[in-house]
Amino acid sequence: MSEANQVLFALLGGTALLLYGVRLVGEGLQRAAGTRLRHVLSTLTGDRFRALLVGAGVTAVLQSSSATTVMLVGFASAGLLTLRQTIGVILGADIGTTVTVQLLAFNLLGFAPLVVFLGWLVFAAFGGTAKYIGQAILGFGFLFLGMKLIADGTVPLKQSALFGDLFAALLGQPLLLLLLAAVFSALVRSSAATIGIALSLATSGLLNLDGAMPIIFGANIGTAATALIAAVGANAEARRVAAAHAIFKVVGVLIFLPLSVYFADLVRQTTDDPARQIANAHSLFNLLVALLFLPFTRFAADLFTRLIPDTGRHELGAMYLNPNVLDTPAVALGQAVREVLRMGDAVLQSLREAITVFERDDDQLMREVIRRDDLIDRLEEDIKQYVVKLGEKALTEEQSQRESALLFTVVNLEEIGDVIEKELMELAEKKIRGHYRFSAQGWQEIVDLHAKVVENLELALSAVATQDHTIAEKVVRHKSNINLLERRLRQTHVQRLHEGLRETIDTSSIHLDVLAALKRANSLVAGIAYAVLGQHDAE
């Protein structure tokens, strides 16, 4: 193999190993800790300093500011976080992502095969969280292996006058180099991979800190592309989060680029090692940008709110399902849950209004309830398609169970909607057209049973939102109680028939059918609770 081919093989093979390593590290750590970190992010308050620390800590664990920011876009899209809550996390995420580069700057290239073997051993020998940690270690091994391949394979280029002239010409065009680094980082969705290549070139003596500065700036801009893509088609708040991340990066670069010579002099005082200088420059840049913008988080939130106003999207169809985050299951599940709860709210509203239709003989409200079933049907279809696509991804056991439970939940919610539209509203129309009146006792019995079914649906939706098995078990217990109540109310109705009450006789078929419809609706509510408990086939 010629020397040129060896160099090309080293560059291409090393870059491929770097990208694969980044992917393994990100997936492994997200699977090992993603659910817990998602909970931490979703409970943030408006404290900007706490948000900064949380963002740095979460990203240091996930080893990806893109993953953290995509989570934030998902939470904002689902209405779980506001822009003001997320800005501090965004700035912290940019600090946390520098941990990867700092680790790569350690002179561990000679230990790369050992790290690969250790990661494979843990991945193959253990299950659960340990398995995913092993995957992350294996990823770091491939990162170091790729860097070693690039560093060793490009050493001959130092002796090439032609390469020296070409490389010098490229380094003499910092804006072009910045653009190339930004595009490459956007394509591979990782600033760590881009800077990892720069570290390799520095290790082989081909790149110094001055030449690496545009690469560092470009990598930081490019990594914002992932969040921008994730926000496409999302609501205004999610687009504001993605835009804030990108603008902070771009403005930070615009501030530091004219001062890069002085900034490089400052970094050189931290160490004499070129690779470590590049890593330190990356860390210091993100730290200073975070400290620069942190005092202005409220102003920035107001500014982005004005720049990206709400569009008043039509409510017929899903609002929170973003297909661009399906590769991040923790976020996609959060969005799916939010949409399921939105569907549940629509069903709950129709169930509550059903009793008002009977009480007031409200023909207009009856039509509104019937029309709302179109939204419920559309949401069921949208959510099912989204969750099925999510199920095709690599999910943890817990995520897979949640995905299955959501499918059963949306099916049951849609059937409850059908009970309301096709049974209760038809009975209401029959009552209205016939000018019938329930007896005072009979009407109160319907009201009491309806109230218990409404309460049970509220509890079931709470169980879906919180995954609280105690609440789900309470819903299941209520199913038996409501079934007993329905049977008792049927008996009291028959007793009134024997007494010859005219109102009871006139409304008998409607009355009994209303009781049966409410009982059926409650059985479907209990099915939602069974899904939360993981007993999808329970009756």
Image (tube, rainbow, N blue to C red):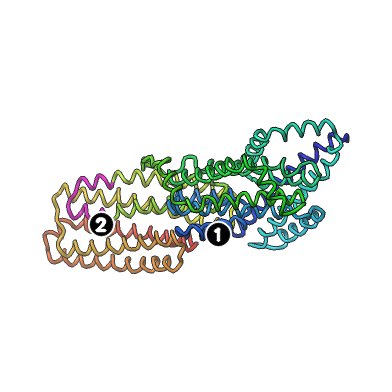
The disc, 2 or 1, on the residue closer to the chain's N-terminal end is 1
Q: On the picture, is 74 further left or further right than 10?
A: left
Q: Is 410 above or below relative to 131?
A: above
- Quadrant for the N terminus, please: top right
Give the label on residue 53, or none: 1
Which residue is at the front of the view, 386 or 48?
Answer: 48
Q: What residue type is labelled 2?
A: Val
Q: Is residue 438 visible?
A: yes
Secondary-structure class at tag 1: helix
Give the label on residue 514, or none: 2
How packed is label 1: few (under 14 Cα within 10 Å), some, or many (20 or more)?
some
Q: Which amino acid does label 1 sit on?
A: Leu
How packed is label 2: few (under 14 Cα within 10 Å), some, or many (20 or more)?
many
Where is residue 408? Give x, y as percent: 45, 54
- Give the CA separation, mark 2 to mark 1: 55 Å
Q: Tell me which segment is drawn in magenta.
A: 352-369
Report the residue at 58% width, 40% height from top. 254
Tell me if label 2 and label 1 are in contact, CB under 8 Å. no
Report the residue at 49% width, 44% height from top. 322
Q: Can residue 539 be seen in this view?
A: no
Give the label on residue 196, or none: none
